[in-house]
Amino acid sequence: MIGNELSAVSIADLQLVLRRREVSSREVINALRERIEAVDGDLSAYLSLDIAAAMKEAEHANVDLPLGGIPIAIKDIINVMGQPCTCASKILNGYRAPYDATVIQKLRAAGAIPFGKTNLDEFAMGSSTENSALKSTRNPWDLSRVPGGSSGGSAAAVAADEAFGALGSDTGGSIRQPAALCGVVGLKPTYGRVSRFGLVAFASSLDQIGPVTKTVRDAALIMNAVAGHDPQDSTSLNAPVPDYVSSLGNSLRGVRLGVPKEYMIEGIDPQVRAAINAAVKQLNSLGADIIEVSLTSTEYAIAVYYIIATAEASANLARFDGVRYGYRAENPKDVLDLYGRTREEGFGPEVKRRIILGTYVLSSGYYDAYYLRAQKVRELIRRDFAKVFEKVDALISPTSPVAAFKVGERVADPLQMYLADIFTIAANLAGICGISVPCGFAELDGQRLPIGLQLLGKALDEARILQIAHAYEQSTDWHKSRPPIASSLPKV
Amino acid sequence: MAGNSDLDVAYVARLARINLTEDEAKVFQQQLDDVLKYVDKLRQVDVTGVDAAAHALPVFNVFREDAPRDWFTVEQALSNAPRQANGLFVVPKVVE
């Protein structure tokens, strides 16, 4: 197995051929390098690659470890020692991570090789990866369309076989939405399930790291490596980590799935709606009971999110002041000039907008009306989910109301861009887990574009949503479809 | 230069230590007025007696032992500094 064929396999299959010594980890790195050279000029999924460092690690790979010798792409907002961590921002120009994030330590301990840093919306603020100050990543299914965001580089890389799997981060849908738009699997774990230590903070009470993969099984394999308590992250949950692979394959008989009536609203593309309805039927035929439920407070989720997330961002991004790392404006006349110009020149428009909004909603006289009220409505959203999860094991919805949109279509209107996250955001506010899995295609302008099915589970119930997503995936062929870019090249 | 909301972008940008051009401030003003108009829907919600959510899950009083441990050396901590000298970050003069 060489070249294109090798780069296209799942992590589970790669494990097998590595363990049988049919290929070496070095050959795997080489196959990825060739693949990236062939397609990344069109896709721009990666911001940086360090092939030499990966090769060195591949030489010492222990393929008998859980992820031994397997390269994993990393969203460029997670610190990997010695590598850049740009957050797709000019303000981190020149920065090199002096330490490994906990997830990177855990991946290494499982034998994996952190490989390449993937593009994102600047500081993970966005839903299309167009807010990257460095590159515009394209959707492998249609190069005139966005890959979603903010983990658009990770999702595009996995979809186009430029990565076997990747880590992303999800603050309001940033793993699940790009996974849906690129036709791959994306899991947002429960808040606190995976350590955030070494993840550059955007909104600390919402951010969570998770896997982007070709199959549900691969997501479970990565979760087995990265989940768990970390004393370096005070919000990390000290709860036992189950084997996420062992529940895969269990029957769905008796599993109760809720369809929130508020989620099948107008504004959903009819092709997306049809695909979700078909998926619900499919899950029902696999033995699951389908129950209509109500989540009345979720219509407020986007409003709550854009107050809380921007407030937290305004505080977190205060650290980028041109003093300790990254970009510094030239010849500042005093320290205020240093701050003001460094941040003017270093941050892009969306980051500035959010810092300004966040500063405003926290400012004296407005705190109660905006921030405090938003935190109270957030509590109502959390209670809504808690109540529904007394009746059902998981919830079903579209991941995104639309398939991939055109590059440039939404950039002028931030509010329209924010509404792209309507189905994903509530899970971050409530702290619960969610997964997106391919469930069909929309046809737009003669192109097939992937649609994602979202399953939401209660806190720490990742094993359950992985089990349901796996059962669905294995009963369909959606995950076997490859984007046109995958077959655009002759097989080696 | 405030718009349809109470937000004065130019003023708040100064609080946030971000210099803005006049054109940028104008565009942001209009875009953020739209966002604030949208979030106004939260006023409809009855939040009487509701506690503010502090965290998604109940995790309280997380302490670790207050003990020294190995971490960055001075060189590592300064490795990304735009300007440094004598083991210190260099900034423009703050106190006369």
Image: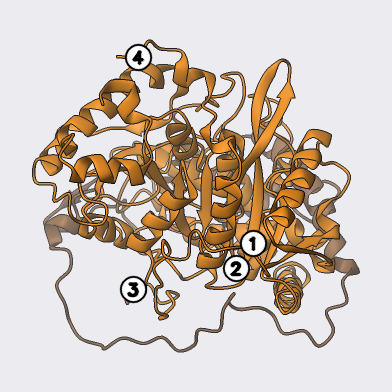
Q: Is residue A269 left or right of residue A235?
A: right
Badge 1 sits on which subunit?
A: A
The reply to whether callout 1 and callout 2 are in contact (CB within 8 Å) is yes
Q: Residue at x 84, y 51 (%)?
A: A264
- Any part of residue B2 in sight: no
Q: Is residue A20 left or right of residue A86?
A: left
Q: Of the residues under marks 1 and 3, which one precedes in the sequence?
A: 3
Amino acid type at circle 3 is Asp
Q: Nearer the viewer, mark 1 or mark 2?
A: 1
Going by the picture, which residue comes out furthest to the top? Answer: A490
Q: Nearer the viewer, mark 1 or mark 3?
A: 1
Mark 1, secondary structure of its residue: strand
Q: Position of residue B64 (x, y in %)?
A: 31, 86
Q: Of the residues under marks 2 and 3, which one precedes in the sequence?
A: 3
Q: Which residue is mark 1?
A: A456
Q: Which residue is mark 4?
A: A491
Q: Position of residue A189 (x, y in %)?
A: 51, 62
Alpha-carbon span between mark 4 and mark 1: 39 Å
Q: Position of residue B27 (x, y in %)?
A: 72, 35
Taking depth in this image into account, of A111 and A194 the one nearest to the observer is A111
Mark 3, secondary structure of its residue: loop
Q: Of the residues under marks 2 and 4, which one precedes in the sequence?
A: 2
Q: Nearer the viewer, mark 2 or mark 4?
A: 4
In the image, which lettered chain appears orange? A
In the image, which lettered chain appears brown? B
Q: Which residue is mark 2?
A: A432
Mark 2, secondary structure of its residue: loop
Disc number for residue A230:
3
